Amino acid sequence: MKEKSFASLPVFLVDDETTVLHATAAMLHSAGVANIQLLDDSRELLSTLERQAASALLLDLMMPHVTGSKLLPEIVHLYPELPVIVMTAAQDVETAVRSMKEGAFDYLVKPVDESRLLASVRHALEVHSLRRQMGVLKRYLLSDCLENDDAFAGIVTHSRKMRAIFQYLEAVAASAEPVLISGETGAGKEMFALALHKLSGLNGQFIQVNVAGLDDTLFSDTLFGHKKGAFTGADQARPGLIAQAAGGTLFLDEIGDLSMASQVKLLRLLQEHMYFPLGSDVARPSDARVVCATNCNLAQMMRQNQFRSDLFFRLSVHQIEVPPLRQHKEDIPLLLQHFLDDAAAAINKPAPAPSNELITLLSNYHFPGNVRELRAMVFNAMALHRGGPVLAMDSFRQAIQKHQKVAADLPLVAAEGMPVMIPGRFPTLDEVDEAMIKEALRRAKGNQGVAATLLGLSRPALNRRLSRRAMRNDS
């Protein structure tokens, strides 16, 4: 049976005093711990754990029937990944030392201080999550398997690099910690965020918001909502996106564009799991899992004081980088066919076949717009297709040549400002011309049409250059 995700696992409270149970549960609920299971009979604990896994256990030591002191070593032996926090009214150093030696995660004395309780439980949940992630990663290293292929159905790939990211996402899906997804525009970061939500087993919604261009007030209103009368025009209360994402995932796209003031508010939300709607002085708990995405280099922005270091380290507990399409070009034929099928179905036409020449051309293009750019190319080509079994290449050539023209108009700057090093004799223009043509033909696998497109030439222009080269060689 597939193990339940961390997000769905309850925190167990075991105490024979129902008033203590409900008071402790209320404190945890107020801090955003939503899934709590109460037991007032210690005899039921072991059988309950057999049926229902837990993320943490708060165990009273002094109970009738079966004491917590007797249960503790058995629980630690049977469920070594489960953090057990023991609670007792006995302020006895010897009891505390004995419990810790037997494997207790922490020791709390009744009446329990609320801040001490919340800190201990949060730490226990983090440790439990990390222990489970290590177990999942160990299984992947040994078996190279995926437990939930369906979650990645929307990501078309057979790349080993992408599969490694899938495995990492399955490992961290059990965590309640934030996830930072980085990558170039058009690489598919939002699809990885959605896959992570599906893997997490969270029952709430997947709520997505692009925070680019939101000033601090609009950011606060969008995420936290407002009370009636909070500002001019606030005729009624409105819940924010965090409330809509309760029990689910809140996906914040373009996080690198967030203002410094908004960064402070996001950091407070991540640390305290609490937020204030605009116009309210009453904090509300949040159990939404936060996933962020950016095409910016946040580490560099942090060094330039454009992004808060404390927020960066809080967000990057789990981090993945979605590779650009040029780093998994083996997926181009698969993606091309996938988008052809989608485009043909959208306009109710039969899907033509892509030619090998087209696949070679696309495999030599660097795709600055990544998968999104390839999709746009295919849909445009399909709209222009006038029938026939093979997809025409004209629109692809035009799109590539247009981009090459734009790139050629930009000033040529050597990498990182370093001069271009040419060892030995400086080559002549004819030698450079011949070398470029030879390399283009090699990459195009001898196809002159593809080579001409790579060089930004028409097919006749390339033929003329090849003819002149042949004449020079003959003479």
Image (cartoon, helix red, strand yellow):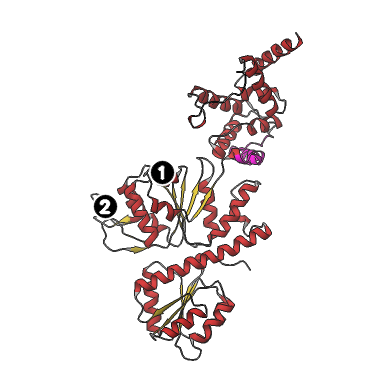
Residue 47 occupies quadrant: bottom right
Would residue 268 be seen by someone viewing this image from the given angle? yes
Identify the residue shown where x is 52% and y is 80%: 102
Farthest residue toward the front? 424
From this view, report whether residue 188 is shown above or below residue 475: below
In the image, is 475 to the left or to the right of 298?
right
Magenta stretch in the rendered image? 327-352
Farthest residue toward the bottom? 65
Point out the image quarter for the C terminus.
top right
Other residues around mark 2 within 10 Å, as few (<14) / some (14–19) / many (≥20): few
Q: Which one is in front, 247 or 447?
A: 447
Disc 2 to disc 1, how far (Cα)?
36 Å
Other residues around mark 1 within 10 Å, as few (<14) / some (14–19) / many (≥20): some
Asked if the magenta segment contains residue 335, the reply would be yes
Farthest residue toward the top? 475
From this view, report whether residue 267 is shown above or below residue 126: above
Q: Secondary structure at mark 2?
A: loop
Q: Which residue is mark 2?
A: 234
Where does the image place residue 189, in percent across and percent down from the top left? 52, 46
Point out the image quarter for the N terminus.
bottom right
Q: Amino acid at mark 1?
A: Met
Q: Amino acid at mark 2?
A: Ala
Q: Secondary structure at mark 1?
A: helix
Where does the image place residue 315, in percent across and percent down from the top left? 44, 54
Identify the residue shown where x is 59% and y is 48%: 155
Circle on res. 301: 1
Where does the image place residue 76, in percent across and percent down from the top left? 55, 78
In the image, is 264 to the left or to the right of 349?
left
Asked if the magenta segment contains residue 289, the reply would be no
